[in-house]
Image (cartoon, rainbow, N blue to C red):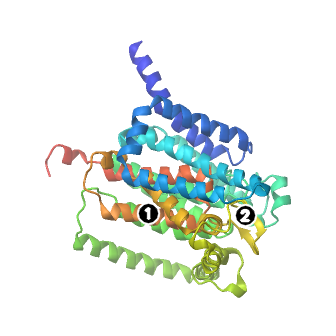
Amino acid sequence: MNLKLEIHKDYLNYRLIFDIFLIIILVSGYVEHIKIWRTLSFVLFLGVILFNLNKTINIFIKNKVFLSSFLICGALLVICVASTTASYASSTLTNLKSLFYPFCLSLAYVILTGYDVSKLRSYLNDRFAFLNIAYIVNLYVLSRQITGSGFMIKSEWSAINSYYEDLCAGLFGFNSTHVLSLFSIFMLLYNFQYSVTQLKNHFLKIVLIVYTAITEVIMIYCSMFNDNMALFVITPLFLLIYYLNSDKNRKFDFTKFRRFFVIAIVGAGVLWAISKLPGIDTFIDDITVRFNKTLFVDSAKIKGSNERLAIVTDALSHGWGWTIGYGINTSPWRSLNTFGYGHFGISSIGSLVYLTGIWFYLAVCVLYSSMSANVKTIINKDKPDIIHSVTLFASFVTLTIYTYVVTDIRMILLYFFIMASIQCRREYIPQKDKKGTE
């Protein structure tokens, strides 16, 4: 009886909340009741803080990077709001809400996981079958959608957005290809770490790795037809981050670096050979052109991918991007045909810099990258890992370039789940090391 009570209490303490996180990620895009999801997010936030008050205080007090960036974000946001006019108060309130709810879930996540990564690893391990089934179901739905069948795509979505490819996102909902991308990256890294940390049988490890590779190939193939360029940029980045953080005790080793360099060269050669296959070469050329458009802004041809950094360049060139932006009240974070851009808000970096300035944007990136770090390490005042810190910041900046992660509750949760998979691998100690045989 006592055992059952203890399990029940443990479930209510954090596992139930993690389950709700997964429901939000997998369901909230298709079941479109934004008030319900936001209310649920706020209730979770309050509940976690009230039942973990000491942890919350410690995170704010002892994580100096988080506290500093939080205070800077708050101060700049107050200045931005104070400079607005009452006639545009609705846009201001909408934008504040879009920032607030993702932060609520992020802070709840940090409070629950920051002190003991083993809890999250245990939870994720228990959800192995569920997560992979959900991924396979989404791949099946996506494979049906890219044929033009309209499978599981609501008619009202097509009425709002006539560009069919944007709607091909599995069961993640309207214009959610970026959410699908992050979920596929999470599953890729999650399965990799599971094969290392949980499977002792070598054959089962190989089976899982092969299965993961096959599902990733299917995802990449489907992404050739749903205009999902972000996947091809973000996936290699997180694979690199996973490798660099695969051992928290790793010192710089030229031999290991050389091995990684050789693997990268061979991989690039294989990809080059694949890119020459009929049909794929055209797709690769299109991806390359659009990637170049993202990096090299041509003001005469601003459209789609080109808008991601063009919006930032515009804000900085006019001066307001270097201060508090054009005004948090002048437009929602995401709005079509705004300020001369057909896809204003296509990425977080553009809308944040344009409306609130570059300093608020940088403070937000530091805030979230510090939240994804191991809070336990910070509070214990261990020596900081420079590679780990830089990769955390770089990964979040990249996400803000290709997604609107700062203002989307699903994407911010997936970001933390991705980093959790990396953290679980990073904190894992092989059994032979625990026994001291090495």
Identify which amino acid the numbered label 2 is placed on. Answer: Asp
Q: Residue furthest left?
A: 437
Q: Which residue is mark 2?
A: 166
Residue 109 showing in the rendered view: yes
Name the side, left or right, on which 167 lies relative to 159. Answer: left
Q: What's the residue at 52%, 56% (across, down)?
A: 73
Task: Report crowding for label 2: few under 14, some 14 to 19, many 20 or more residues within 10 A (C-alpha).
Answer: many
- Report the front residue among 181 and 201: 181
Name the side, left or right, on which 291 lies relative to 302. Answer: left
Q: Secondary structure at mark 2?
A: helix
Residue 293 in percent (x, y) is at 62, 81
Q: Which residue is mark 1?
A: 393
Q: Secondary structure at mark 1?
A: helix
Residue 174 in percent (x, y) is at 73, 55
Identify which amino acid the numbered label 1 is placed on. Answer: Phe
Q: What is the spatial separation of the Cα atoms under label 1 and label 2, in whole angstroms? A: 28 Å
Residue 207 showing in the rendered view: no
Mark 1 or mark 2: whose residue is earlier in sequence: 2
